[in-house]
Every structure is written in C-alpha cells, then in structure tokens.
Amino acid sequence: MSDHGFFDEGTLVAVLTAQPIDRLLDYKAPEGGCMTGAFVEVPLGPRKVIGVVWGKGRGGFDLKKARSVIRVLDVAPMRGEMREFLMRAAEYTMTPLSMMLRLATRAPGLGDPPAMRKVFRLGCGAPDRETDARRRVLKVLADYSGLSFTLGELAEQAGVSPSVIKGLVKQGVVREEDSPRDLPYTPLDPDYNGVDLTPDQATAAEVLRDGVASGTYGTTLLKGVTGSGKTEVYLEAVAECLRKGRQALVLLPEIALTAEFLKRVEDRFGACAGEWHSGVTMTERRRLWKMAGEGNVGLVVGARSALFLPFRDLGLVVVDEEHDTSYKQEEGVLYNARDMVVLRASLCSAQVVLASATPSLETWANAQAGKYKRVELTSRFGAAQMPDMRAIDLRAEDIPASRWISPSLRDAVAARVALGEQSLLFINRRGYAPTTVCRACGHQIGCDHCDARMVEHRFQKRLMCHQCGETKPMPDKCPSCEAEGRLAPVGPGVERLDEEVRALFPEARVAVLSSDLFGSARALKEKIEEIAAGGCDIIIGTQMVAKGHNFPLLTLVGVIDADLGLQGSDLRAAERTFQLMRQVAGRAGRVEKKGLALLQTTQPEHPVIRAILSGDEEAFWQAEAREREAAGVPPYGRMAGIILSSENAAEVFDFAAELARRDDPLRQVSAQVFGPAPAPIARIRGRHRVRLLVKAAKGVPLQAALKAWVGQLRVPNSVRLAIDIDPQSFL
C-alpha cells in the first residue's frame, strides 16, 4: 500500500478507528492538512478517539454534516506496509479491521503532547528509618534495573501511597527527575562483544547473516538440539541487521525468559534492548511504541503482541521456540504469531528465523518443501552432551496408593541429592489435584459457571477453575450430600508432588515452578535465578520449565506422567507430547556432566514414547506427516473452527444446526462441515458452547467460502460467533 497521499484542509478523508465499528468513517482534514497513515484524534459521538487516516473519504452524504479531524498526533505515521499487514491479517483471520488496529495501538497516552514529566529512579544511600513500605519501593526500583517510573506507577507496583515515595525523595534515596516523556534507546553496538562460535554455529550464523544482508524476504528454520547455542547464532543475525541500520524483533514464548535473555543481549551489544510484554510499565510501553515508529530502538524483545509494533524499518524477526503453543492467541483476535510474522516480513523485505529444537510440523513441512531454508546445530555447545533417555515402566514398579514417584525415580533423585546435583520432576498439571471427589456420594466439585472440574490449590487453600478463573474456599463438606470429612483429592498436580517429595526427601531443598504461584514476572525471575545459582536440590515444575531455562547443576529430569498428553483426540497430541518431552529432557546435563531423563509411562511401547527415547526426530516427523497427509489435515489440508456460545443452550444449538444445514457455499469448494457438537468444555463463564469444524483441501479459498456461509444467517444478539482459522486447540 502506498505511503503517498496528502490531504489539504477540508478534504474528506477516511479514518479507521479501533472502535467496534466495522467500517471507515469520513472526516474533514484538519487545519494544516494530514497525510495517509497519520494518527489522528477524531470526534465520535460525544467522545474523542484515536484513529488512522486510511485514504480518501467516500462521501455520498451532505458534506456540511461532516465533522473535522480534531488534530494530528505527534507520532510517526503508520507506514504503508503496516496498513497492508493489518488488512491482510484481518482478511486471513476473518477479523474486523478495527480489532486489528486495536492490536497495533496498544500503548497508553499516544495522544499526549510532548512534554516533560516527573520520573523516579533509584538514588543512593539508605533511608534514615526502614519500614516495610519503604523496602517495597526500593525493591521495585532495584528489580526493574534502573527503569524510570511515574509516581502513580511506582506507588501501584510497590503497593504504597505516594507520600512514602516523596519521603524517600527528600532523603535522596529515590531520585525525582524531569524527563522528556519519550527518549530514544541507547544504540546497540553489533561489534561490542562478539563470541567465539563452534564450526557448526559459525556455518549457521553465516547463512543467517547472508539472508539479512540481502535486504530481501526469506524464512529460515534454525533447528538445533537443546543446549546447542541457537541464541548465539541468531544474535549474529541481529548484529548484521543492526549493521545495516535496520530494526530487529525477537519473540519469546514466556515472560519469565525475558530477563535472562535481555542480560545476554546487553552483554553482547553493550546496551539494553526495548522490552515489550505485560510485565513492562505503561510508561515504558508508550516510549517503546513511539521509538519503534521513529526508528529509535534497534532491537525489541517481547511477547507475541510485539509483532504489531509500528517499526520504521523491520529487517529481522526471530521466533524463539517457534513450536510453542503460546504464540497462538486464543481470545479476541484469533491469530498465530508465527504465521503472522512470516506475513509481515514478506511485506517489508525482512528475514525470519524460526528457532527450535523440536519445530512444529507446519514449519518442518515448509522446510521439507523448500519454502523455508533449514540450518541445523547437531551437537551441544562446549563439553555438554545430550542426556540419556530411558523409560520407567510403571506396570513393573511397586508404587504405594496415592504416590506417583516410582522407586526407580526415587533412587535416581536420591543419588543426585547426595552428589549435590539438581533434579527436575516434571508434571504438566498446576495445583494440588485436578479433581476433588466425595467418597460418600461420588460428587465431583465443578465450577458454578463452567462444565469443568475445579482444581484444588492447597497452597492457596482454594479451589480454582482453570477455564474462567473462578475461585472459592475449599469446602469442609460435600456440596451435594453435605457429608463432612469425605472429600478426597484425585490425581496429582505440582503441589501434591511437592508434598510427596518433601516426605521422601525431608533434608532436600525443594522449589516449585508453576505460573500461578508467582504474583509477578519479577518474582518468577528471582526464583529462576536462585535455582540456577544452586539454591535448591529438587525442582518441581509444569510446562514453563521446558522453555529455555538453563540450570547448570541440573543432571536429572524425571517425567511423572509421560502418557498425559497422549490422551484425547487432538490431532496434534502426538506432536505436542514429543516436543514437550524432548524439551523438558533437554534441561538436563547442559554443562559438563552428562544428564539423564527418566520417563514414567504405562505404555513404553507407544510409538511416540519410542520416538522420544530413540531421539530419531526425523523418523517421527516423517511418520507424523504421512498420517496427517493421509487424513488431509494441517499442514496438508485446511481447517477452521466455528465456536458459537450463548447463555441459552437450546438457542445456540438451533442456530448451529441451521448453519450446518445451509452448507452450500462450503460444498461448492468441496469443504466438509462436521458438527454441530458440544465443545469438549461445553460451558464456560455461564455460556453454552457449540463447535463446528470445517475441513478443506490445501489450496481452497476457505475464508471467502466461510464468509458466504456465515453471511446467510443473521446471528442473534445473544449468540457469539467466532471463527478460528487453523485452530490449535479444540476445547
């Protein structure tokens, strides 16, 4: 889309806003005129809202009634490639363009005029009197490594009143400064502190550097075993991007990974990268958004939403752990950041690096077909070796009732504790127990608003629904039969495993890593740093421990239930189990000492378990690809999920059934409709959920057919309809 187009004062312009109005609105250009892509403030009813000038107005009404743009914001205009990206992404995901714009303007205070403001940083010395409130203020300032806060942000983060901060300012312990609202980031030096690469790494880095230097679009799969040094390789591509004067973006799947990664960036380039995720202050988010548009930040590290920042000249995007399911947004705009990265890069002549030890089948298939380049790192960095992997057949183990650690695994952990080494026990279940059952009547405690069992979180002494977040105190008696003392936990979670570990190893230091046990990303970061420094003997963790963490003393990984992910009918169950088991096993033996991974299973003969143990990844992907291709499902076919919900179960089923009957537009492109059927979790937040699944051949124009199909019926106001192109989850 062209960036050209200036509109003189009074000319009719079309403005896209982020409001739920699925069309462009006409306004008169303001005094001084405006250009295509300009961010503007416009009147909408009694309100003032932010929008973007999308082009020439359509007119067709009495122009005397047209209202004027209030003002043009003092930020860089939205570039043509960004507008094209939003339109293409909206078309692909079947999302209103206004919702896509909302993703691209998620920064506070964009309309604020340039001005000075009071900011607060860590000063020097100690307060004359220590209090808990003062300690919290100083801890927040220290945790955020010198970042500035406004008074309100600092007070909120520390949980104190502004007067506490002002008292520390008077003593010089906290500095109050006048600062421009948004300053450029310190430039990163691509030649500041280069690292010595192994021959494998040097070859891979050269391929990535050449791609960036070409100034053209291309996507490369960087496949390397866990611990092989993929980060060092793609940071060389970042360095080349900086040398070319272009901007780079690195996406990470987990906020907890950003702190360690940012430190590595600072060590490599001599300055801090921009940081974008939910744990960053609003002040810094606004600054980064503006600096990205002006080209005054060279490297951004962030979560999936960083993809929608308004980069002036994006030259490289790295998707680390590209297989991770957290790159798929499951609410609001339903998109996969990995796929949208490729789209955006193709529009701005940027390179994409998809890095993983266990790539998604979609990425693997694209590399096999020659659409993506593929470079590999086949060995671990330095003296580290890949861990040995073995199965523990639970059918042959004598495990007491209500216990989940087999004698074989227990002995292996005890040996590591005796040697001063660390062990990781992995179970992909949060909480204490997934189900609570009454022994008197058999009632399972469920959520009042969802068709889901409530999970006991004993550390918090509450039951929690993992679908809607509803919590309630743990009852003393059965909600159904009112029998007292008959409620029993069924199955293990990390908290129950913690209880068992402390009973088996009373002298060991135990740490539990689960996302719901930490109030902030900073608290989680501190715990991970403590573990990496040897602050515990046994780590108990959920899926988050599989994502890139490096614990030098960890030499044993024990998977409590390797069969868990193989249950159910999800077409990606085998792939995800294989990825997760290989990733978590890769945490062991990342320094000198060789590691060991033990998988507890009741099905050691299962093809996926055998593939995990053998390490023959190519054979696994080829077998999985053959099965998917035979079934005509992604990546060898197309799918779309249609999710309908209403508070009225009969209404939503009737509407879904009528929609299924009118499938002519889909049959015209040889697509099939399956359903309607209740979703696996049929009620969430009080709304009854029905699913339909559409399956089509690879080259079918599915979006157009879906639009014609759904457009036949008017969706009742009480029914919500969402279309998920390329669904990752079938819940």
Image (spheres, helix red, strand yellow):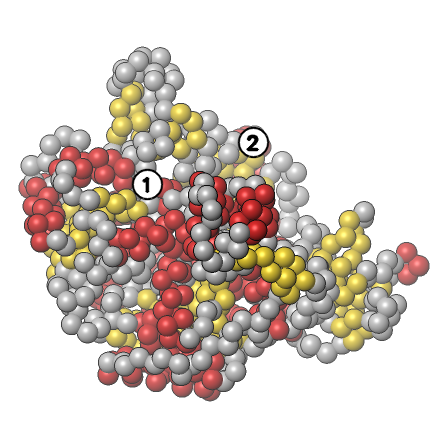
Label pair 1/2, CB-CB below 8 angstroms: no
Relative vertical location of residue 660 with respect to residue 378 in this rendering, above or below: above
What percent of the width, then of the height, locates residue 570?
A: 34, 49
The N terminus: image quadrant: bottom right
Query: Which residue is under mark 1?
Result: 430
* Circle count: 2
- Circle 1 — which element? loop
What percent of the width, then of the height, locates residue 402?
A: 17, 31
What percent of the width, then of the height, locates residue 673?
A: 48, 49
Q: Which of marks 1 and 2 is nearer the N terminus?
A: 1
Q: Looking at the rendering, which quadrant does residue 111 occupy?
A: bottom right
Residue type marked 2: Glu
Q: Looking at the rendering, which quadrant does residue 371 occupy?
A: bottom left
The C terminus: image quadrant: top left
Is any part of residue 668 visible from this angle? no
Residue 266 vs residue 21: left or right?
Answer: left
Front residue of this view, candidates 177 and 36? 177
Residue 682 vs residue 175: left or right?
Answer: left
Is any part of residue 472 visible from this angle? yes
Residue type marked 1: Arg
Front residue of this view, candidates 259 and 116? 116
Q: Which residue is drawn at 65% across and 38% down?
A: 716
Front residue of this view, candidates 207 and 136? 136
Residue 46 vs residue 629: left or right?
Answer: right
Query: Residue 647, which numbered label?
Result: 2
- Circle 2 — which element? loop
Outermost residue toward the front in this view: 128
Q: Which residue is drawn at 28% across and 75% down?
A: 376
